[in-house]
Amino acid sequence: MVAPPDNDVIRALSLHYAYGGTPALTGVSLGVRAGEVLAVSGPRGSGKTTLLQCLAGQLLPDSGEVWFNSSPVHTLGSLARERLRRERFGWIDTDPQLVPELTGWENAALPLLLRGTGARAARGKAVDWLERLDVGDCARKRPAALRQPQRQRVAIARALAAEPTVLFADDPTARLHRAERASVLRTLTAAARSHDITVLLATHDPDVSAEADRSVALLDGRLVGAPTANDDTQGRTACSLSV
Ligand SMILES: Nc1ncnc2c1ncn2[C@@H]1O[C@H](COP(=O)(O)OP(=O)(O)OP(=O)(O)O)[C@@H](O)[C@H]1O
């Protein structure tokens, strides 16, 4: 097996994935360069979540290849993929998925603590990111005492505090009101850009795609059309794509 001849941080080659025989991804290939915010757009059921899960090593494709920094992901065993996810990847879900028993800072510090970071350093980083995301006042509160946009900001702080190489965000603003959506999204993309974190952003909302450096569209499990560049963003790097 030979690594693809480029320096994409993530590269997928001809991914196929089916749920019980029903195809969700059909021959998807794409490459993302370091530091880029790449939107994966498409209507509900088009395969966005499945694609992100395959790229993040959560799902193994039925066929095709996934590469991270020239190392194969699709051939790793479950423990090695788990470690890769813990140490190099971050994930933001549509719903915040916070631990109800933990406070805001404890939730935000969790990935760092699981990685072995000392409690004091983990707390410092978590609180710092909560403040950057305008939810510093949520540090001592449990999720039940927070509003939904606050909970999602805590979840974003949790993902960013670990400073992943690649952050996968699965429709992270879908449950927020329109006014809150733009603000949360801009904060997320600005924070990722300032820390050179590559972001793959799944969304069905064209306004969200517009915040990315480039966008690709999925329909019925296939990439459609040419990738589009959003010139009005602060994008710095091009992404290479092939369908
Ligand atoms: N666990 C599952 N079991 C069976 N079918 C599934 C499962 N997850 C997704 N699917 C199906 O696979 C297809 C792709 O789903 P996927 O969730 O990847 O799309 P999506 O674009 O992320 O949709 P949404 O925007 O609604 O999250 C859909 O037809 C969906 O019904």
Image (cartoon, rainbow, N blue to C red):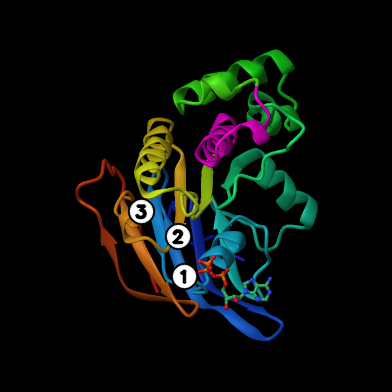
Do residues under tags 1 and 2 come within 8 Å of each other at their CB atoms?
no
Q: How many marks?
A: 3
The spot of residue 176 in percent (x, y) is 46, 48
- Residue type at mark 3: give it: Val
Q: Which mark is residue 48?
A: none
Disc 2 or disc 3, which is closer to the eye? 3
179 up-or-down from 4: above or below? above
Q: Which residue is mark 3?
A: 208
Which residue is most to the left?
Answer: 231
Q: Which residue is mark 2?
A: 5
Seen at 73% across and 18% down, the residue is: 118
Badge 1: few (under 14), some or many (20 or more) residues near its Cα, within 10 Å?
A: some
The secondary structure that most of the magenta stretch takes on is: helix
Say what secondary structure mark 3 lies in. helix
15 up-or-down from 132: above or below? below
Q: What's drawn in magenta, residue-wise? A: 141-163
Q: State the separation of the CA atoms marked 1 and 2.
A: 14 Å
| On-image quarter of the C terminus | bottom left
The spot of residue 35 in percent (x, y) is 40, 42
Q: Which residue is mark 1?
A: 29
Seen at 37% across and 49% down, the residue is: 178
163 up-or-down from 217: above or below? above
Do residues under tags 1 and 3 come within 8 Å of each other at their CB atoms?
no
Residue 147 lies in the magenta stretch = yes
Say what secondary structure mark 2 lies in. loop
Say what secondary structure mark 1 lies in. strand
Q: State the separation of the CA atoms marked 1 and 3.
A: 22 Å
Where ligand 1 lies, by image quadrant? bottom right
